Amino acid sequence: MPDDIWRPKLDRYLDSELSAEEMRGMDAHLCECGSCASEALSRLQVKRATRLAGQRYVPSNEFRRRMERQVAARSRARRVWVWVPALAMAMLLLASIVTVGRWYERTRSQQLLTELADIHVADLASSTPVDVVSSDRHTVKPWFQGKLPFTFDLPELQASGYKLIGGRVAYLEHEPGAHLLYDVGAHHISVFIFRDRPEIERVFPARDSSRRVLSFHVESWAAGGLRYFVFGDASPEAIQGLSRLLKQAGA
């Protein structure tokens, strides 16, 4: 009977369209029902594959720049006596380009965060969620040497309530990065660290940001040429607390 109630809501749950109370109820149900949890993971993977296929048709940066150059060239070629309508048209086109650009940035950042959420869910569902198993940061950090084109620092967790489980190499846009797994209480938190490349900088703000992706709270920030993402179904306060420790370690 519970499956009959919750299973029809899986798609709206994965799209974060349920009410806060229903989201909490679904979270609790998935922790208890292996059948629904497996179905949720299957649907999540289908959604991810669909999104990745759709990315082939996202306008490139070069296309946007070419459009801007064409608009600018046309506006300069107009005769003086028609400058008013020409300027109005150029402004309209520019406003459209800016609107499309902002929409693209929001959509692109959501796609990247959803891809990381998929990795978080898939790794937790795996029998081996991490490749280096240790609660000692001095063991986990050296394991990444030679596997990543950058280094990073991990925080001291003594008396913090957080526990380091281990880590593995993850990939975002074909770029390798660190995926670290932490526990706080009964919750799992993923920390992703990648180089802050221009294509990542463009769709994520330089300032700290907090978001919600599917049923996960997300903290993101850039520091020292690196981009950090902290994912988990723990409370926002727990996500923010681990984020503060990571920022202090990297300061």
Image (cartoon, helix red, strand yellow):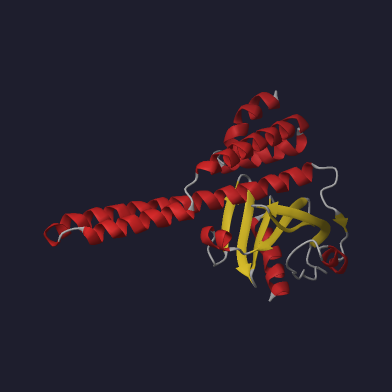
Look at 52% across and 58% down and name the residue there: 203
Look at 36% across and 57% down and name the residue there: 68
Q: Is residue 237 left or right of residue 76?
A: right
The residue closer to the viewer here, 156 or 22, is 156
The residue closer to the viewer here, 114 or 146, is 146
Residue 39, image x, y percentages:
70, 31
Q: Is residue 251 left or right of residue 101?
A: right
Q: Is residue 134 positioned above or below 9 on the image?
A: below
Q: Is residue 83 left or right of residue 197?
A: left
Q: Is residue 13 positioned above or below 142 on the image?
A: above
Locate residue 70: give its quadrant. Answer: bottom left
Q: Is residue 234 positioned above or below 207 on the image?
A: above
- Image quadrant holding the N terminus, namely top right
The residue closer to the viewer here, 135 or 194, is 194
Residue 22, visible in the rendered structure: no
Residue 175, image x, y percentages:
68, 56
Locate residue 199: give its quadrant. Answer: bottom right
State the residue lying farthest toward the left: 81
Look at 62% across and 41% down and name the residue there: 23
Residue 223, image x, y percentages:
63, 71
Q: How many marks?
A: 0
Residue 205, visible in the rendered structure: yes
Look at 73% across and 65% down and name the residue there: 149
- Image quadrant holding the C terminus, namely bottom right
Locate residue 163: give its quadrant. Answer: bottom right
